[in-house]
Structures are given as structure tokens and as C-alpha cells.
């Protein structure tokens, strides 16, 4: 049995180094080709026609004028007469033409008659959505009624967090060609190169092997880009109808924002009880959320503090005439963190207690008490909590009030199914191939680091090839499982390949293969640099052969091997200033203390945490899908009014990892999601600390802040 | 009644050398609201040299080279670059002059290519990221600084940021931290790379002053 385990922390040369990402120059110089950049010979451009109504039946559809429009190659009806449309943005028809402008003009010539039906698109008031509400049943633990009677202090409050969209900068879509030979060349924007092939094959009813997927780079996904989607299938059919010409169909921005992915809302009526010393004894909640027409979205509350002894939770799923949810960076956790940490701090305020002390006091109600206590103290230190925190509302004179607040997170993040192939060529070239993808996290770079470490080489010596179904299958980049999966499979494949190479060169070095090692660009007898061959010389011994070995991460077995595990906690502390005259919240600082296992590349890992924190700032202060009750449409389906934070809006961000032997021994744990969870709660709590009252409705836009200050219900 | 439809005013304007082409270019560049002009009236008034309404052949000066394209007058510079000329460093993200992913330099000034008509870009020096990012196999200081500081994740917004950063540093060679935060406010990133971008722009400023790679 080969030894796959990670080399000891102290002896690593490449793993753990702050290296720049290997595709950095390519991306920063604009030379990186995303699939939305492709221009293929004879390529057609396709444009979707979508429903302007949130709920309607298609009475008739006439595409004849569109078909006759100059340049049009194919027209397809997606929603024929009789189709019941369930959201604004539902795909009705699609046109492929020689130019994008011709396709746009042709789409406008399609005549549709609708029977408009009643819709429901707003869920902030549960009483108004009655027939659309589906209770999920009650969860009960202990005796909440009795505990509430015995509590020294109780709190009753309501909170709400809106639906957000993924807003990937590279929109969803693909270039796809369905050749006369039946082979499909599929260039999607996806976070799952391997599985999207099988999904498309099923939808087109063709063998998987007839589809080839290729993608070099993907411009964002955040959980929304796993499936081929209707636009993938329709583009394939348009190509077939147009004699196999490649068809490019990427969503325009309004469509992207309306139907290509969103996160469910979350609303909560809660009653809490605690002892005088801050010990939480009882949690009773009624929550509701909507994930579009299918309902969905059930935040796990109480979050992190799961062991509250007396609990009663009721959740209701609301079905709306809006497009379905997709996984959004840490699905359900951000809502849960906000809907738990906000009432906890409100309870602390009622107890006139420092919430830091209260969170620490109740850490025994979490699954990892020591971790959270340590992290809360570290985050407090990094945010200067003891100096800057003050009792709620006691923020001094003048219109600018400063405050601090806490949010917590937890996540799994173990490694997914992944197979890698490492090939060593006689000239010394090393290739590592995986049907994986680099979502922007630095996957390419960390794969090269693992292979280089294993072979005693440097990162530029390794050629990493991703994004193609000709390479061994690898999992979806979801759930923060990619880095765990691909580092493990790469390690195994590379150890296997090295063992083969060592067997080939053992004779020449006069030692058995198991007494050889690869170190500093050489193959040598263990611990004896005088008996060695350079990497090149060793590889030349292969003659005309190549060594090509695979290795797989098997999630069920991964923890035993110690290459990767799951389960982390983290704490965010926000420091904000609020202008109580304008309602504008300004970020001073966001501190993220994050539990993490073995860190392959601290530089790219930190970038992920910076990004996660910034997404939290966007969600806390700006982002919100606004639906129009009257028309059923999204009012801000553009990037002007669907607001994201800019470079000036984010304040200072401080990241702290616990990089030490103890955590390192847990192996690689995914990082993309956990630090994106606690920020909204932390910022909301900081605003409450600053202005002396809770802004119960996220985002904390000037309007919502001023409403809260004036006692208005927003 | 609009001023332009008034025959007397039209005569006066002719005297002042009014051309509809110039007028149209004015609309394209400034985004002014056009007075209501029916197509047949426009046709009747059309002096020679007017472009459209169908596709027209134009030449654009891109990265120092003349490049030919056939565009409809309503086509944006961004779409001409991406769809016709295969110059794809500038990305189409918001398509409404908000996010900066399509940033290019027009006569040295950073501009949103989604908000300029291709016909209006005639006779101007268009520089895309491809025009300066690499020279002799060596990356521009801004590109190198973006890599050094990991000022990118998915990378889709990055070329736009690099163009905007270069233009910013051309005008503000010694920026303060606060100036960087103001100067790059026209670009958005969904992955959240702003921390890296701030550091990268400051480092690039130093590199450019040091003469390495400017």
C-alpha cells in the first residue's frame, strides 16, 4: 500500500507556500478565453424570448414572421399553446440567426397571446400568501412552554432577509454544436464539467459519450451553474435544426438576474428565554421562506447553538410565482446565521450583557465549544472589541454612531468524488489531468502544488489540465468540496506515478525502489544526495514509455486516510458607522476568524475569505431582489439597481486562519462557503449596537435604517 | 415642435454647417435625448455621408491598427470588438454602463465599450487590454501587480479592472490609498477581489515609478 499521507508540515516545500495563481497572467491580461468569448466559424447567435407575466397560460404563439426575418436560421417554440407559465422570465421561444442583432429583431416578431392568471410574488407577510403556504411540521425538544415560564428574561421579535440573486458576471449559457455525425461539442459556463455532460445526454436522449465538454475558465457560479438548463438543451436543438452550426446562447443581464439563480428569503417570528446570567434555555420560532414556485428554503434554526434544551420550531414553505432557487454559496446557512445571531444579540441587549460574553457562555450549546470560544476571543482581539464595544445605543453624541456585532458559521467541506491522472513523460514533463474546473478559487494552482510537492519539483514544472471530459471524472464545485477532492486524487495519482518511475530507475541507483525519494528536482537514495539522478535523467530511463497513473478520492474513505475531512466553525465580527441622519451604513472593518484544515495556498485561501466577507457586505447592505406585486416582475433586474458593493464600500477586512499542526492533521477542508455565512449577522448586530435599535429587515439600506430609527415598519 | 423640424431654423443651421452625421455622433457620445424625428423625415433630410440604417463598412483604430468591420449603426463598440473582431478581453456583463467589465481606452480615457456605438468610435484611438497587457512576452506592471496580489478570482471582471487601473495610474501616478478607492469605483466584482485590487494598484504605481515594466 503506497503512502499517500501528506508530508509533515515542517518538511513541505511547495504545499503551504503563498504562491501566485498559475493562470493569473492569462486572466489579468485578458487572454484567458471563457466560453462566452468563443467565436467559432459559422457560429449562430441565439436569443431567448421570455414571459413578461408571472402567471399565465399561452393561448397562441405565431413564429412565422420571425422565421422569415433575414439571417434567421432556426426558431423553436419552448412553451407551446396551453403551457402554464409560472414566473416572469419563463422561456417561451428561442431564435438562432447569423448575428445577435438579427436574432433580437426576429424574437420581437413572435406573436404570443396570453391568458393572464393571478400571481403571488411577495412573501414578507405570511397572512397574505395563505393558499401558497405549506407548513413543514413542528419540531419539538424539551418543554418550551414550561421553560418560557421559568425564564428570567424573554424576548419576542421578528426578522426578515430577502431573496438574493447569484448575479454571476459571466452569464449562464454556452456555445454548442450538434454535428451531423451526432456528436455534440458543448462549451458551457459551468461549475461541473464532468456531470453536466451526463445531465445533457439525458435531456437530449443521446449517449453520454457523444458529448464532449470543454471549458478553460468560468466567470463565476456561486452554486447556480451545475445544470445544462433549458437554454442549453434549446441551443443544442437549434444547432441540430441549423445543420450542426455552433450556436451561442448566453443570457442577457435581465434574464440572468430573473431566472438563472437566486437564494431563498427567510423570515422569522421568534421567542427566546434565558437565565439572568445569559444562559439560553428556550427557543420558539415560526419561520417562513420562499424558494420560488417549488417553495423550499428552510434555514436550520437555531443555527450553531443547536443544543438549546427546550425548542419548538415551525417552518412554512411559501410557493411564489418566481423562478426556482439554486444553491447559493452556503445554502440556507446565511439566513440561519442571521435569524439566530440577531435575536441572540437582541436578548443580550435586553439582559444588558456584552454579547461576546453571552456567545461564549452559550458555546456549550454548539457542536464545537472549544473552537468557538477560541475564535470568539481571537475575533474580539482583532476587532478591538473590549475597547470599541459599548452597550447598545450608547454610541455618544453626533449623527455618526459606531457599533460592533458578531456572527457565527459552520460548514462541512469534505472532499468530493474525484479521479486524477498523472503522466510523467521521458523528457521529464509532468501532466495532471482532471475533469474538474477552476471556479476562481485557485484549483489549478493547488493541484500543481500537490503534484510538485509529491515529485520534488516546482510548480512551473507541472502542467495541470482541467475542464474537459476527456480527463478523468471529478465532482461538481459545490459545497466547498473541490479542494478536498482534487488534492486527494492528485496526491494519490502522483504518488502512484512516482512509484512506477522509482521502480524504473531503482536498478541504476543500486537501491530498491522503496528506498528512493523524489526531492529538490532529483531522485535519490533516501537521505543520500550523492546517490542521485536529476529529474530529467531519471525520466530518460523510461525510454519510449510514459508513466501514467490515476488516483481517486473516495468520500467515504477520505477521513480514514487523513487527506481531507470536513466540519469547521468560524466567527465574524463587524465594525460599522451609521449616519442616523441619512441612514447610510459604512463598513469600518470586518474580521473573519476561520477554522481550516491543511492550507495548500494561504494566498488564494485568503482571497476566498476576502470575497466571502465582501459578499456578506453586499448582502447586508445592498442586495435585494425587488418584486413588483402588481406586475409580478422583478423591478431591479439590472446591475444598476440590483446593487453590489464597490471597492469603496467594503472597509478593511481582516482574515485569521489557525494554521497549526493540530488543524493541519485534519487534512484539507473546503473554505469557499463558511466565511460567507456570518457576515450578514455580524453587520446587522453592529448596526443595532450603533443605533440602539434593530433594523429587522435586511438589507440595511438607508430606507430600512431610517424606518427602524423612526419606529416605522419597513 | 422641435427646433430641428422648423424650416427656418433648419436653414439657419445649414448655414452654420449643421450635419446630421455630426448630430448623430453627438447623440452617441453624449447620450443626449434625440428630438422626435420620423424615419421618413430623417430620410428626406439625410445629407450625404449619413450612416445606416442598414449595416455599413467602417474602419476602427484598435490598438494602433486599422481594423475593418461591417456594423449596424445601433451596434455597440463592445459587441463589434467581441463578435466581429474576436477581441474578447472586454467582457459583456451588465451591458448598461454600470459594472466596468467592458472598459477600454478611447483616446486614452477609460470608457465603457457597451455605451459607445461602433460608428462613433471611428477616428478615435481605441486601446483594449490586448493592446498593452503584454509586451515582448512581459506583462505590464498593472497585470503583474494584479497577479502578485491575487487581485482576481474567477477573473471575468479582471481585464476591465486592469484597464481602469492603468488609466487611473496614467492620470494619478502617485495615488494615495483613498484615491485608489475613489478611482476604481466604476468597476464591480462579484467574487470580491477588491482587497487585492487596492494593493495591486498601489504596487503597480511603485513598479511604474521604478521604471520596471512601465
Image: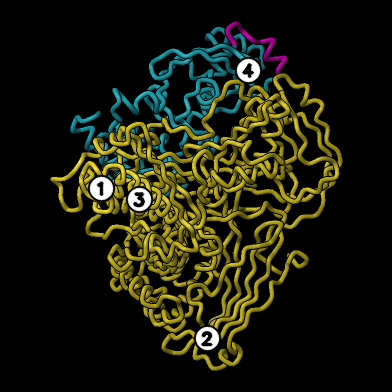
* In-image side of A410 versus A116 (left or right): left
Residue A588: in magenta span: no
* Whether residue B194 can be seen here: no
Q: Nearer the viewer, residue A369 or A92?
A: A369
Q: Earlier in the sequence, mark 2 or mark 3?
A: 2
**Mark 2 = which residue?**
A309
Question: In the rendering, at what x and y percent does residue A15 appear?
Answer: 30, 52
| Quadrant in which the N terminus of chain A appears | bottom left
Q: Quadrant of residue A31?
A: top left
The residue at the point 53 percent across, 8 percent down is B17
**Mark 3 = which residue?**
A495
Spatial separation of the CA atoms under disc 2 and disc 4: 78 Å
Spatial separation of the CA atoms under disc 1 and disc 4: 81 Å
Letter of the chain in yellow? A
Letter of the chain in cyan? B
Stretch in magenta: B38-50
Spatial separation of the CA atoms under disc 4 and disc 3: 78 Å
Label ID, residue B4: 4
Q: Secondary structure at mark 1?
A: strand
Residue B44: in magenta span: yes
- Tags 2 and 4 touching, CB below 8 Å: no
* In-image side of B188 versus A332 (left or right): left
Chain letter of the residue carrying label 2: A
Whether marks 1 and 4 lie on the same chain: no
Whether marks 2 and 4 lie on the same chain: no
Chain letter of the residue carrying label 1: A
The residue at the point 63 percent across, 36 percent down is A210
Closer to the camera: disc 1 or disc 4?
1
Q: Quadrant of residue A268?
A: bottom right
Amino acid at each position: 500500500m503506497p503512502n499517500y499521507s501528506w508530508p509533515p508540515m515542517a518538511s513541505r516545500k511547495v504545499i503551504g507556500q503563498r504562491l501566485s495563481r498559475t493562470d493569473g497572467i492569462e486572466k489579468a491580461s485578458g487572454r484567458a478565453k471563457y466560453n462566452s468569448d468563443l467565436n467559432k466559424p459559422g457560429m449562430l447567435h441565439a436569443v431567448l424570448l421570455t414571459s413578461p407575466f408571472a402567471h399565465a397560460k399561452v393561448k397562441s404563439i405565431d413564429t412565422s414572421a420571425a422565421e422569415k426575418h433575414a439571417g434567421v436560421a432556426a426558431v423553436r417554440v419552448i412553451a407551446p399553446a396551453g403551457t402554464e407559465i409560472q414566473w416572469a422570465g419563463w422561456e417561451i421561444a428561442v431564435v438562432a440567426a447569423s448575428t445577435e442583432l438579427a436574432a433580437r429583431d426576429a424574437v420581437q416578431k413572435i406573436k404570443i397571446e396570453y391568458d393572464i392568471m393571478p400571481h403571488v410574488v411577495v412573501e414578507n407577510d405570511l397572512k397574505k400568501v395563505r393558499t401558497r403556504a405549506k407548513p413543514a411540521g413542528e419540531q419539538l425538544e424539551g418543554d418550551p412552554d414550561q421553560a418560557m415560564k421559568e425564564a428570567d428574561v424573554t424576548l419576542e421579535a421578528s426578522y426578515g432577509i430577502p431573496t438574493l440573486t447569484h448575479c454571476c458576471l459571466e452569464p449562464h449559457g454556452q456555445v454548442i454544436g450538434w454535428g451531423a455525425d451526432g456528436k455534440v461539442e458543448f462549451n458551457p459556463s459551468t461549475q461541473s464539467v464532468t456531470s453536466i455532460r451526463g445531465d445533457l445526454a439525458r435531456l437530449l436522449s443521446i449517449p453520454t459519450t457523444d458529448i464532449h465538454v470543454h471549458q478553460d475558465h468560468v466567470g463565476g457560479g456561486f452554486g447556480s451553474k451545475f445544470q445544462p438548463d433549458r437554454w442549453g438543451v434549446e441551443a443544442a436543438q437549434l444547432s441540430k435544426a441549423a445543420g450542426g452550426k455552433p450556436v451561442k446562447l448566453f443570457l442577457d443581464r435581465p434574464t440572468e438576474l430573473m431566472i438563472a439563480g437566486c437564494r431563498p428569503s427567510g423570515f422569522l417570528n421568534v421567542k427566546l428565554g434565558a437565565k439572568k446570567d445569559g444562559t439560553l434555555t428556550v427557543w420558539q420560532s415560526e419561520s417562513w421562506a420562499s424558494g420560488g414556485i417549488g417553495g423550499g428554503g428552510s434555514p436550520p434554526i437555531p443555527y450553531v447553538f443547536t443544543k438549546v434544551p427546550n425548542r419548538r420550531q415551525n417552518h412554512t414553505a411559501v410557493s411564489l410565482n418566481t423562478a426556482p432557487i439554486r444553491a447559493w454559496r452556503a445554502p440556507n446557512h446565511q439566513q440561519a446565521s442571521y435569524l439566530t445571531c440577531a435575536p441572540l444579540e437582541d436578548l443580550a441587549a435586553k439582559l444588558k450583557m456584552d454579547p461576546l460574553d453571552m456567545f461564549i457562555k452559550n458555546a456549550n450549546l454548539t457542536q464545537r465549544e472549544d473552537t468557538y470560544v477560541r475564535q470568539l476571543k481571537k475575533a474580539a482581539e482583532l476587532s478591538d472589541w473590549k475597547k470599541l464595544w459599548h452597550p447598545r445605543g450608547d454610541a455618544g453624541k453626533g449623527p455618526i454612531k459606531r457599533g460592533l456585532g458578531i456572527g457565527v458559521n459552520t460548514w462541512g467541506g469534505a472532499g468530493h468524488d474525484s479521479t486524477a491522472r498523472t503522466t510523467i513523460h521521458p523528457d521529464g514533463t509532468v501532466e495532471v489531468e482532471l475533469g474538474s474546473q477552476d471556479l476562481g478559487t485557485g484549483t489549478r494552482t493547488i493541484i500543481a502544488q500537490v503534484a510538485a510537492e509529491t515529485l520534488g519539483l516546482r510548480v512551473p514544472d507541472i502542467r495541470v489540465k482541467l475542464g474537459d471530459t476527456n480527463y478523468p471524472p471529478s465532482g461538481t464545485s459545490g459545497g466547498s468540496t473541490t479542494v478536498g477532492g482534487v488534492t486527494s486524487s492528485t496526491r494519490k495519482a502522483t504518488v502512484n506515478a512516482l512509484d512506477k518511475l522509482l521502480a524504473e530507475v531503482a536498478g541504476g541507483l543500486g537501491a530498491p525502489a522503496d528506498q528512493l525519494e523524489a526531492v529538490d528536482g532529483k531522485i535519490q537514495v533516501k537521505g543520500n544526495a550523492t546517490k542521485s539522478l536529476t529529474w530529467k535523467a531519471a525520466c530518460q530511463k523510461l525510454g519510449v514509455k510514459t508513466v501514467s497513473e490515476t488516483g481517486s478520492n473516495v468520500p467515504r474513505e477520505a477521513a480514514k486516510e487523513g487527506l481531507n475531512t470536513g466540519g469547521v466553525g468560524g466567527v465574524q465580527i463587524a465594525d460599522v458607522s451609521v449616519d442616523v441622519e441619512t441612514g447610510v451604513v459604512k463598513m469600518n472593518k470586518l474580521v473573519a476568524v476561520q477554522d481550516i484544515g491543511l492550507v495548500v495556498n494561504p494566498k488564494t485561501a485568503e482571497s476566498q475569505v476576502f470575497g466571502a466577507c465582501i459578499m456578506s457586505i453586499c448582502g447586508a447592505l445592498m442586495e435585494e431582489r425587488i418584486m413588483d406585486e402588481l406586475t409580478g416582475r422583478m423591478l431591479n433586474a439590472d446591475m444598476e439597481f440590483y446593487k453590489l458593493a464597490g471597492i469603496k464600500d467594503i472597509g478593511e477586512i481582516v482574515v485569521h486562519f489557525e494554521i497549526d499542526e493540530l488543524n493541519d492533521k485534519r487534512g484539507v477542508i473546503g473554505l469557499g462557503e463558511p466565511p460567507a455565512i456570518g457576515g450578514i449577522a455580524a453587520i446587522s448586530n453592529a448596526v443595532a449596537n450603533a443605533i440602539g435599535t434593530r433594523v429587522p429587515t435586511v438589507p440595511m439600506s438607508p430606507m430600512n435604517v431610517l424606518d427602524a430609527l423612526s419606529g416605522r415598519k419597513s | 415642435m422641435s427646433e430641428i423640424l422648423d424650416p427656418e431654423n433648419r436653414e439657419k443651421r445649414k448655414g452654420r454647417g449643421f450635419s446630421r452625421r455630426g448630430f448623430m455622433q453627438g447623440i452617441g457620445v453624449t447620450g443626449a435625448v434625440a428630438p422626435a424625428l420620423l424615419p421618413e423625415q430623417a430620410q428626406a433630410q439625410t445629407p450625404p455621408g449619413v450612416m445606416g440604417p442598414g449595416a455599413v463598412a467602417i474602419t476602427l483604430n484598435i490598438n494602433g491598427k486599422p481594423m475593418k468591420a461591417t456594423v449596424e449603426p445601433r451596434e455597440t463598440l463592445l459587441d463589434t470588438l467581441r463578435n466581429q473582431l474576436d477581441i474578447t478581453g472586454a467582457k459583456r456583463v451588465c451591458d448598461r454602463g454600470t459594472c466596468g467589465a467592458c472598459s477600454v481606452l478611447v483616446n486614452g480615457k477609460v470608457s465603457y465599450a457597451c455605451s459607445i456605438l461602433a460608428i462613433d468610435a471611428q477616428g478615435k484611438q481605441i486601446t483594449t487590454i490586448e493592446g498593452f497587457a503584454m509586451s515582448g512576452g512581459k506583462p505590464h506592471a498593472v497585470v503583474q501587480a494584479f497577479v502578485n496580489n491575487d487581485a482576481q478570482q474567477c477573473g471575468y471582471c479582471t481585464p476591465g479592472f486592469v484597464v481602469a487601473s492603468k488609466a487611473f495610474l496614467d492620470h494619478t501616478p502617485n495615488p494615495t490609498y483613498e484615491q485608489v478607492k475613489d478611482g476604481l469605483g466604476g468597476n464591480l466584482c462579484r467574487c470580491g477581489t477588491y482587497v487585492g485590487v487596492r494593493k495591486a494598484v498601489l504596487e503597480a504605481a511603485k513598479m511604474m515609478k521604478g521604471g520596471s515594466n512601465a
